[in-house]
Image (cartoon, helix red, strand yellow):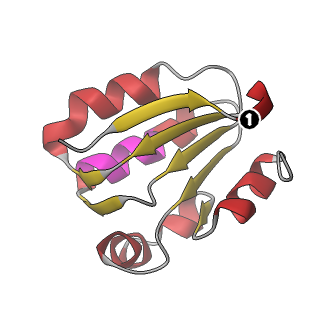
């Protein structure tokens, strides 16, 4: 089964949520629990090992941005299904979406850590 991991970032100045596989409604409880229990730190949502997403996941990601007071950056693969979906729905116009980790960390203000 694909994994969802939440871990403190390096030096505990950001938090990372790494989600693998297809991000769909069948994983809603797992994703909602992870997004609902984030500490008050800048958060990196690492989807580089994601293979696709449905509208439920995209909605949860937008709700996370709205509810979480700290900065959020999402890193996705530069190509493939997930990149196409994010492009189709204009996710980078709605939140900080990047295709490389360094840019995502810079957006959180933790680059070089």
Dividing the picture into quadrants, the one containing residue 48 is: bottom left
Query: In the drawing, does residue 78 fall left or right of residue 11?
Result: left
For the question of whether residue 13 can be seen, the reply is no
Q: Is residue 11 magenta?
A: no
Query: In the drawing, does residue 7 fall left or right of residue 57?
Result: right
Q: In what quadrant of the picture does the C terminus appear?
A: top right
Q: Position of residue 80 (x, y in %)?
A: 34, 79
> Is 23 above or below relative to 102?
above
Q: Position of residue 12 (x, y in %)?
A: 75, 26
Q: Which residue is drawn at the image coordinates 80% and 56% (left, top)? A: 106
For the question of whether residue 72 can be seen, the reply is yes
- Write down the residue under mark 1: 10
| 76 or 95, nearer to the observer | 76
Residues in magenta, as a range: 56-63
Considering the whole magenta stretch, tell me its main secondary structure: helix
Q: Which residue is drawn at the image coordinates 23% and 35% (left, top)? A: 28
């Amino acid at each position: 089964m694909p994994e969802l991991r939440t871990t403190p970032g390096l030096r505990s100045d950001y938090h990372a949520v790494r989600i693998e596989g297809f991000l769909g409604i069948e994983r809603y409880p797992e994703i909602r629990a992870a997004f609902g229990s984030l500490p008050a730190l800048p958060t990196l949502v690492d989807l580089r090992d994601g293979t696709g997403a449905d509208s439920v996941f995209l909605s949860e990601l937008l709700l996370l941005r709205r509810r979480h007071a700290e900065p959020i950056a999402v890193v996705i693969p530069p190509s493939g299904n997930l990149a196409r979906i994010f492009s189709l729905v204009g996710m980078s116009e709605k939140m900080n979406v990047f295709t490389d980790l360094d840019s995502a960390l810079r957006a959180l203000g933790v680059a070089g850590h």
